[in-house]
Amino acid sequence: MSGARSGMRALIVADGDVPGRAQLDAAWPGWDREVGLVVAADGGWDKAASLGLVADLLVGDADSLPEARFAALAAEGVPIERSSTDKDESDAELALLAALRRGATNVTVLGALGGKRFDHALANVGLLSLPDPEDAEVELLDGSARIRLLRAPGADRGAVSLSLGGEVGDLVSLLPLGAPAIGVTTDGLLYPLHDETLPAGPARGLSNVRIAADASVRLRHGRLLAIETRTDRPE
């Protein structure tokens, strides 16, 4: 993973906290650029509409979007993938799977963080592990944070890298997921890492600071969450 892959971009709108368009535009310019598919996860339909987006597909079990709305949208010809409420997957997971089946290679998920359900937010972070590394790149966005996952198989497959380009002064946290992240090297961050191991648990990778607009991270083996947080700046 050395940057966004070419191919279809998809936008998934889940039913968590979704910031307004102005906030997203300010924090993440281009977040909706060249989107070829918009998937609403249940109550994310109305939240997509609040951003001026018309979803191409509605996925869910009608627990957060009333049954009558599902029926009305179906009558209007909206494509719907209806699921049972007794299911193993979340609506956001089903929406991501639907986007991948349709050929999405870059996926942005809104509404995956915040809200009253921390368990949902944590499960949504786990969705970053869902696609095979060769299939798609997925990011979670809210009004101040972007979360991505860097995965390196190790052995003789070589290191992988991720661009962390953005505003100087923003925070960048690098947190191992599930097991130690081995061979972590950073560029453009205040507290550099040089082919080092970040063990799972200790917070050594928390709250680094971007000191160059073209920062990056490399990983030789393991899984590493890259969490970029926009900092408040005076107007």
Image: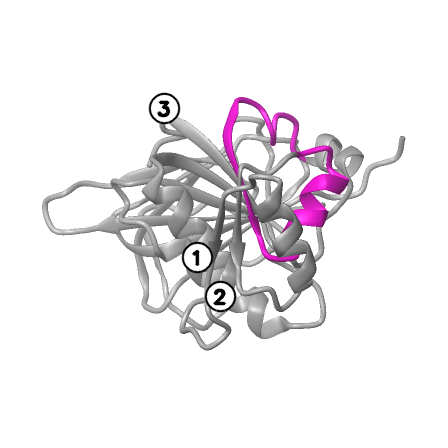
User: Which residue is the site of mark 3?
Assistant: 6
Q: Residue furthest right?
A: 235
Q: Amino acid at mark 1?
A: Leu
Residue 107 appears at what percent x and percent y?
46, 40
Asked if the magenta segment contains residue 207, the reply would be no
User: Which residue is the site of mark 2?
Assistant: 90
Range of residues picked out in magenta: 28-53
Q: Amino acid at mark 3?
A: Ser
User: Which residue is the site of mark 1?
Assistant: 94
Pick the front one: 58 or 151: 58
Q: Amino acid at mark 2?
A: Ser
Of mark 3 and mark 1, the one earlier in the sequence is 3
Q: Secondary structure at mark 1?
A: helix
Residue 65 appears at what percent x and percent y?
67, 60
Query: Height in image: 119 above or below 137?
Result: below
Asked if the magenta segment contains residue 40, the reply would be yes
Residue 192 appears at what percent x and percent y?
47, 44
Q: Residue at x 36, y 28 (%)?
A: 5
Pick the front one: 21 or 185: 21
From mark 3 to mark 1, how far is it between C-alphas? 23 Å
Residue count near mark 3 (Cα–Cα under 10 Å), binned few <14, some 14–19, many ≥20: few
**From the image, which quarter does the C terminus lie in?**
top right
